[in-house]
Image (tube, helix red, strand yellow):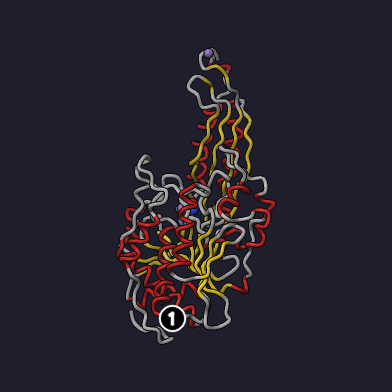
């Protein structure tokens, strides 16, 4: 791989070890029952076991000093030669339900590998290097996504989540966070001092097909989309499915069905290529075959690079809600869950990633991220950058999610090199 400006002879990453680590992490939460997918949702047994595995790996194998903050983010630190702010490499170890093997996991395994290469060479950077696994990146039944990185960036406060409970089990977020090693009442202490961080780098699968369809091995991210999410609760009237005449019904599910299609239309009409909207979660109550549905709650999200795009979709949806309320005699309540602006990656970090790819002789593409990432919050307090690896067929958040080892190894080499470039600045 060549010699860095600091004179360190950089050997590439060890792809066999990367493959083996990806397999090791994949032992946690793999479920044959759900089509071979993974589930390491925040607070599940599998998620807690994956945490332990990471902690041991960073501490016992890499010899890093490991600590957990009050948001249960796991941090490993390799000291630097000089008293400088840290270069941070991270991602997340939780998954969506029935998700894939690489989302989040790849970034952690590559961050681990990069640090391990430095440890093996006995090479200390000028800056301390930190690896981090952020808590609860994915949406979860506590309705709090990117919990760890938001707390680290100081944009999630205790008041925002004090009353959060698991929507099905009623377990409090406080208890779940405590079980993971955090402390909700002291969440504010997870906030990072921006002066202590030099840059944040996250490697991730693209999760879309822009790299894959162009045969491009690497992607350097310029911006991360904004995400708006809300819960919509439709209150109708539960009644006997045999005796309630059609004219007398206030069927919450039929009303919700109109809302789902109305929302889709609002997105398609209001948006350009980079505006997408999804209703991916629906709860029907009481959910029995012989009861007219009395209440439905659904979660909608809009992703857009700019606020106006989201606002336009929501204005059209407002009208749809009024129409459905009147036409079906239901009440609709809406609760905003997330309103996260788009973020921009830092030009110097983008430059380091581009230079790393160029030095390796690998083609790369500059692209925006249509998926959310912890980097979006880190970008608010430090210089952030992301490196994307192609997703085979553009598939993600499903068991078929896959990335090729040859691309993964290139990303590992580029990540290591970009870290060295940033260290020499
Ligand atoms: O939902 C997302 O975009 C991310 O994968 N958490
Ligand atoms: Mn994800
Ligand atoms: Mn992810
Ligand atoms: Mn009966």
Residue at horizontal 31 percent and vertical 60 percent from the top? 404
Q: Residue 237: x and y, percent?
A: 60, 23
Percent coordinates x, y for residue 280 in the rendering: 48, 41
Q: Secondary structure at mark 1?
A: loop
Tell me the residue at 59%/65% (across/down).
380
**Residue 289 visible in the picture:** yes
Label 1, on which residue? 123
Q: Percent x, y for residue 202?
A: 47, 65
Q: Residue at x 53, y 48 (%)?
A: 43
Q: x%, y% of residue 232?
A: 59, 38
154 with respect to 287 (left or right): right
Q: How many marks?
A: 1
* Quarter location, residue 4: bottom left
- Residue 329 horizontal side relative to residue 37, left or right: right
Point out the residue furthest to the front here.
Answer: 60
State whether residue 105 is above or below residue 292. Answer: below
* Res 370 visible: no
**Which class describes the residues within 10 Å of circle 1: few (<14), some (14-19), or many (20+)?**
some
CB at mark 1 closer than 8 A to ligand 3? no
318 on left or right of 219: right
């Amino acid at each position: 791989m060549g010699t860095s400006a600091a004179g360190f002879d950089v050997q590439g990453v060890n792809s066999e070890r990367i493959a083996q680590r990806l397999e090791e992490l994949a032992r946690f939460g793999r479920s044959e029952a759900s089509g071979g997918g993974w589930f390491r949702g925040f607070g599940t047994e599998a998620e807690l076991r994956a945490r332990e595995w990471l902690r041991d790996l960073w501490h016992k194998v890499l010899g890093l000093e490991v600590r957990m903050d009050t948001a249960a983010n796991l941090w490993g630190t390799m000291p630097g030669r000089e008293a400088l702010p840290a270069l941070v490499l991270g991602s997340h170890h939780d998954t969506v339900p029935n998700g894939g093997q690489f989302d989040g996991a790849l970034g952690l395994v590559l961050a681990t590998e990069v640090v391990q290469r430095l440890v093996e060479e006995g090479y200390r950077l000028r800056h301390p290097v930190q690896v981090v696994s952020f808590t609860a990146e994915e949406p979860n039944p506590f309705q709090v996504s990117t919990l760890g990185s938001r707390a680290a960036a100081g944009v999630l406060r205790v008041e925002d989540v004090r009353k959060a409970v698991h929507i099905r089990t009623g377990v409090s977020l406080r208890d779940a966070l405590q079980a993971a090693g955090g402390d909700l009442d002291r969440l504010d202490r997870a906030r990072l001092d921006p002066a202590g961080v030099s840059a944040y780098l996250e490697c991730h699968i693209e999760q879309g097909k822009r790299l894959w369809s162009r045969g491009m091995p690497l992607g350097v991210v310029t911006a991360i989309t904004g995400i708006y999410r809300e819960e919509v609760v439709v209150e109708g009237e539960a009644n006997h499915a045999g005796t309630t005449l059609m004219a007398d019904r206030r069927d919450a599910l039929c009303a919700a069905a109109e809302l789902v299609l109305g929302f889709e239309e609002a997105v398609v009409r209001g948006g350009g290529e980079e505006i997408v909207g999804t209703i991916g979660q629906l709860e029907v109550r009481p959910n029995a075959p012989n009861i007219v549905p009395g209440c439905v709650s659904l979660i909608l999200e809009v992703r857009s690079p700019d606020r106006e795009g989201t606002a336009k979709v929501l204005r059209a949806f407002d009208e749809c809600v009024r129409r459905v309320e009147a036409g079906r005699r239901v009440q609709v309540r809406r609760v905003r869950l997330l309103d996260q602006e788009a973020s921009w990656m830092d030009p110097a970090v983008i430059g380091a990633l581009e230079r790393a790819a160029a030095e390796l002789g690998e083609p790369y593409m500059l692209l925006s991220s249509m998926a959310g990432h912890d980097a979006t919050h880190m970008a608010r307090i430090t210089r952030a950058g992301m490196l994307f690896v192609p997703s085979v067929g553009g598939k993600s958040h499903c068991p078929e999610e896959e990335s090729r080892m040859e691309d993964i190894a290139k990303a590992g080499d580029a990540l290591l090199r970009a870290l060295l470039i940033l260290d020499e600045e």
